[in-house]
Amino acid sequence: MTAEAWSDEDRVRAVVSEQDARSARWCLVADDFAGEAAPEQGARWLQAVGVDATPETLADLGERVWNLTRLFNVREGHDRSDDELPEAMTVPLPDGPAEGAAVDRERFDAMLDAYYDARGWDDEGVPTDATLDRLDLTEATQ
């Protein structure tokens, strides 16, 4: 699928999936070059040392880590305003192959809303109680 054929929903889903996968790889002390094979390979590595792991449990791990990271950042004062793009990205490029291209701020805000929704976060980017319950992270906020 070409980038032009992706819906905004496809883009949000891809970002969430990649963030979760990267978080799981980092927990395995594997770098990003492990790539797409990481969930299966990571599960095999853990199974080799007696851990009952599957690609699905690694995906869950990645989601939990991403949410824990967000909870830490929220505790430290991070909010929606910190998820904004730099002003320079909203200014049309003066020349080159992408001349005139710029990020549309309204579309970005709509996609950020969709991203928060896909993550199970509220309008300010804070994981909801339901998300924390589902991920067994409620104690992390106490």
Image (tube, rainbow, N blue to C red):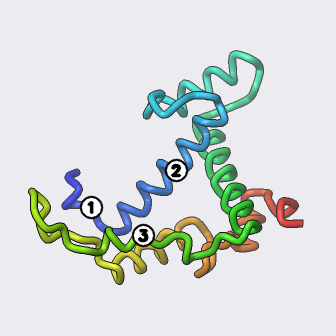
Query: For the point 24% across and 71% down, which residue is it?
Result: 102
The span from disc 3 to disc 1 (Cα, nearest Å) is 21 Å
- The residue under label 3 is 85
**Mark 2 surroundings within 10 Å by alpha-carbon count, few (fewer than 14), some (14 through 19), many (20 or more):** some
**Which label lies toward us, 1 or 2?**
2
Q: Secondary structure at mark 1?
A: loop
**Which label lies toward us, 3 or 1?**
3
Give the numbered dot on residue 19.
Answer: 2
User: In terms of image quadrants, where is residue 71?
Assistant: bottom right
Q: What kind of residue is marked 3?
A: Leu
**Which label lies toward us, 3 or 2?**
3
The span from disc 1 to disc 2 (Cα, nearest Å) is 18 Å
Left or right, 60 with reference to 93: right
Question: Percent position (x, y) of residue 115?
Answer: 49, 69
**127 up-or-down from 11: above or below:** below
Q: Nearer the viewer, residue 90 or 42?
A: 90
Q: Split into 4 quadrants, where in the image is the C terminus?
A: bottom right
- The residue under label 1 is 6
Query: For the point 10% across and 63% down, which residue is it?
Result: 95
**Mark 1 surroundings within 10 Å by alpha-carbon count, few (fewer than 14), some (14 through 19), many (20 or more):** few
Q: Nearer the viewer, residue 1 or 67?
A: 67
Q: What kind of residue is marked 2?
A: Gln
Check if mark 3's residue and mark 1's residue have beta carbons within 8 Å. Answer: no
Left or right, 117 with reference to 110: right
Question: Percent position (x, y) of residue 17?
Answer: 49, 51
Q: Secondary structure at mark 3?
A: loop
The span from disc 3 to disc 2 (Cα, nearest Å) is 18 Å
**21 up-or-down from 136: above or below:** above
